[in-house]
Image: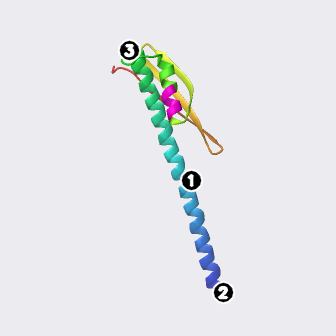
């Protein structure tokens, strides 16, 4: 009987640990996707600001963010340098990422 209790406890601990690791892994993936959306939005805005692609810079960033399934919080232009902040919900949490893009210094 004591061996059964220990085995059940060990299995329960493994299940809890696996669940926690899965949640951490999902959060890491969501963070990387959010960072990619911010990077792509900033690049699109900087390209539009420089005239490399047609369109209004922040509208281009918004199109990219929408395609990634995130929302633009801010889009700022300083000459040809674009700074874009995007956000999304991850379960009960609010995640945010920012990126800057522009010509090399």
Q: Which residue is found at the position 50% from the left and 47% from the top?
A: 28
User: What is the x, y in percent for residue 25?
Assistant: 51, 52
Task: Give the label, 2 or 1, closer to the camera.
Answer: 1
Q: Is 36 colored magenta in this rendering? A: no
Tell me the number on the disc at residue 51. Answer: 3
- Give the residues in magenta: 63-67
Tell me the number on the disc at residue 1. Answer: 2
Q: How many marks?
A: 3
Judged from the image, the secondary structure of the residue bearing numbered disc 3 is: loop
Q: For this rendering, which residue is in front, 49 or 67? A: 67
User: What is the x, y in percent for residue 15?
Assistant: 58, 66
User: What is the x, y in percent for residue 97?
Assistant: 52, 33
Q: Is the magenta stretch mostly helix, strand or loop?
A: helix
Q: Quadrant of residue 91?
A: top right
Q: Earlier in the sequence, mark 2 or mark 1?
A: 2
Say left or right for 104 vs 73. Answer: left
**Which image quadrant: the C terminus?**
top left
Q: Rate crowding at label 1 as few (under 14), some (14 to 19) or many (20 or more) other CA atoms within 10 Å.
A: few
Q: Quadrant of residue 44?
A: top left
Judged from the image, the secondary structure of the residue bearing numbered disc 2 is: loop
Tell me the number on the disc at residue 23. Answer: 1
Mark 2 in CB contact with mark 1 (< 8 angstroms): no
């Amino acid at each position: 009987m004591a061996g059964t209790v220990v085995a059940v406890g060990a299995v329960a601990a493994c299940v809890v640990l696996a669940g926690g690791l899965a949640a951490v892994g999902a959060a890491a993936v969501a963070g990387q996707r959010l960072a990619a959306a911010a990077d792509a939005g900033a690049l699109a805005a900087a390209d539009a600001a420089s005239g490399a692609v047609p369109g209004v810079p922040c509208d281009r960033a918004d199109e990219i963010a929408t395609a990634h399934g995130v929302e633009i919080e801010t889009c700022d232009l300083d000459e040809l340098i674009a700074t874009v902040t995007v956000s999304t919900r991850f379960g009960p949490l609010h995640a945010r990422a920012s990126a800057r893009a522009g010509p090399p210094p």
